[in-house]
Image (tube, rainbow, N blue to C red):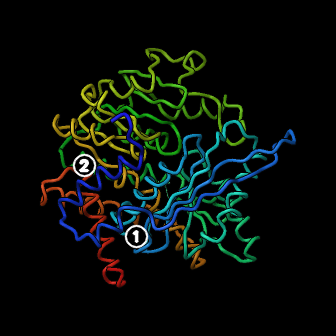
Amino acid sequence: MPNSTPYSRFQTVLDDVLSKLSLSDEQKKWFAQPQFIHKKEVSIKKDDGSDVSFPAFRVQFNNARGPFKGGIRFHPEADEEEVKALAALMSIKTAVVNIPFGGGKGGVQCNPKELSKGELQKVSRAYVRAMLDSIGPDIDCPAPDVNTTPAIMAWMRDEYEMATKSYSPAVITGKPLSYGGSLGREAATAKGGFFILQELINREAMDPSELKVAIQGFGNAGANMANFLHSAGYTVVAVSDSQGGIYSPEGIDPVRIQKYKQKTGQVAGEYCEGSVCDIERMKMDGVSHVTNEQLLELPCDILIPAALDNVITEVNARKIQAQFIFELANGPTTPEADAILEERGIKVIPDVLANAGGVTVSYFEWTQGKSGGMWTAERVDSELKRIILDGYKAVRREARRESMTYRQAAFSVGIKRMLEAMEVRGWL
Ligand code: GLU
């Protein structure tokens, strides 16, 4: 559908599942629109003395189950429609893993790669000042998302604490370890995904050493997932970043790529400029360049979109060769593509389950911030495993019982849990 938006794509999936659940109009109303949409401009003075402002959003979709929760992205395409869709997905996601949060999302429509570190800090602080009345440890707790880092979370917490004259480590998650962060948060999205994938592969009686994986995106989620899979014996045949990707049927060592990115990347603001597709300088043999589009259609068993949304569409869904699609990105598959993949027998593990490890460890970080306690890495790992696999089992059960795809089943589990909370709170 050429005219679809992220939110209309969300609604297509939602409507499909709502129709299967036979809800009342009163119940459906809660899923049609977010509870609150905050739209502001953040203005900063650039290093050259000029003034610039960027549209900024915080969408609070639903807080029936607890404070709104979800990341903030800095991206040129972060507009109201996108942030709305991501906030809605967060509400379903927190419910699927059954943590006591609702769903929200934020965005600043800017290209952070064109900002200096100082400018980035100003944008981060200005965002918090613009949204001050709407966020708080018991109201709405932001976190990292596309292009936002622990450093940015630290500036945001600092700005919030100064503005409210409070000590509020739980206002935001994904912070650096030295300033209220949690062990295990950085790799949590990938770790949660890895636990699910291992469980899935075990159940299918498959052997990781015989499985080839292609990963689109080499940010926090993609790069950590590549490492976990490589260490567990999977063959990572392709990786990419926004510049493009590399492919080797024999396998790629993600640790080497990461080191290369870190070593050669001149840091522009917070972002590394070294690219995974810079293979000439990496001196790797048997490796060829692929575009981000070509990567999706490579021969592999597991395809992991771990970058942006709307990449698996009706245009390429028939060309995908993987048997499993594991969505570490939010919203990578359109509803039209979903239908084609289902018909082709390709199993999709949806974003609201596959990447829920991040927000799950955010919950642990929030808990530690509230209580003043500190968890060990072992405790984070074992609790994450328990919670994410419980979510996976709930979705699997629902899919089997209701003859649904995993995406429909995840939505169904999430919606039912949200409704239960609304019911007991007397909202319905
Ligand atoms: N941005 C992440 C997500 O989409 C994490 C959100 C959080 O930790 O609150 O799930």
Q: Secondary structure at mark 1?
A: loop
Image mark for residue 63: none
Farthest right residue in view: 49
Image mark for residue 200: 2
**Quadrant where the N terminus lies?**
top left
- Identify the residue shown where x is 41% and y is 25%: 293
In x, y percent, where is residue 46?
81, 43
Give, as a three-letter code, the residue at label 1: Ile
Image mark for residue 99: 1
- Identify the image quadrant of residue 237: top left
Of callouts 2 and 1, which one flags the residue occurring earlier in the amino acid sequence? 1
**Quadrant where the C terminus lies?**
bottom left
- Residue 229 appears in the picture as rendered: yes
Q: Secondary structure at mark 2?
A: helix
**Which is more toward the observer, 227 or 51?**
51
- Identify the residue shown where x is 57% and y is 77%: 370
**Which is more toward the observer, 141 or 190?**
141
- Residue 382 appears in the picture as rendered: no
Q: Is residue 133 left or right of residue 9?
A: right
